[in-house]
Amino acid sequence: PLEVRRRVQQVRDVFHQATPAHGRRLATYLIKRLPTCPISEIARLGRILRKWKDAHLAYFETAGASNAPQRSHQRTLSN
């Protein structure tokens, strides 16, 4: 359980780094390391991040921008 908590915290920390470059560096490290984790859930997360690597790392090149609709936009579109 301690290893799981540590890895989950690292994934969260990706989005809370001082600069986008630091976040990208940590994300790149996790994309390489998580798929080899002996804990199946963490390894699965690593494989998903590796599959979505380009989109995940693009977050750090676009100042956190995303093509996903935001909740406020969804309300506007549905009204």
Image: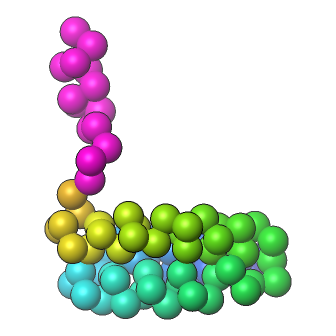
Residue 18 visible? The answer is: no
Instruction: Specify whether residue 68 is painted magenta.
Output: yes
Which is more toward the observer, 31 or 5? Answer: 31
Q: Is residue 10 above or below residue 52?
A: below
Residue 37 appears in the picture as rendered: yes
- Does residue 58 sit above or below 6 in this rendering? above
**Residue 36 percent location from the top left of the image:** 73, 86
- Counting from the top left corner in percent of width and height, residue 37 is at 74, 84
- Magenta region: 66-79
Residue sitting at x 40%, y 77%: 14
Residue at 60% over, 65% down: 48
Q: Quadrant of residue 55?
A: bottom left
Which quarter of the rendering shows the C terminus?
top left
Q: Quadrant of residue 8?
A: bottom right
Residue 28 as seen in the image, left or right of residue 9: left
* 49 in magenta: no
Where is residue 61? Give x, y as percent: 21, 73
Q: Quadrant of residue 27?
A: bottom left
Is residue 49 shown left or right of residue 54?
Answer: right
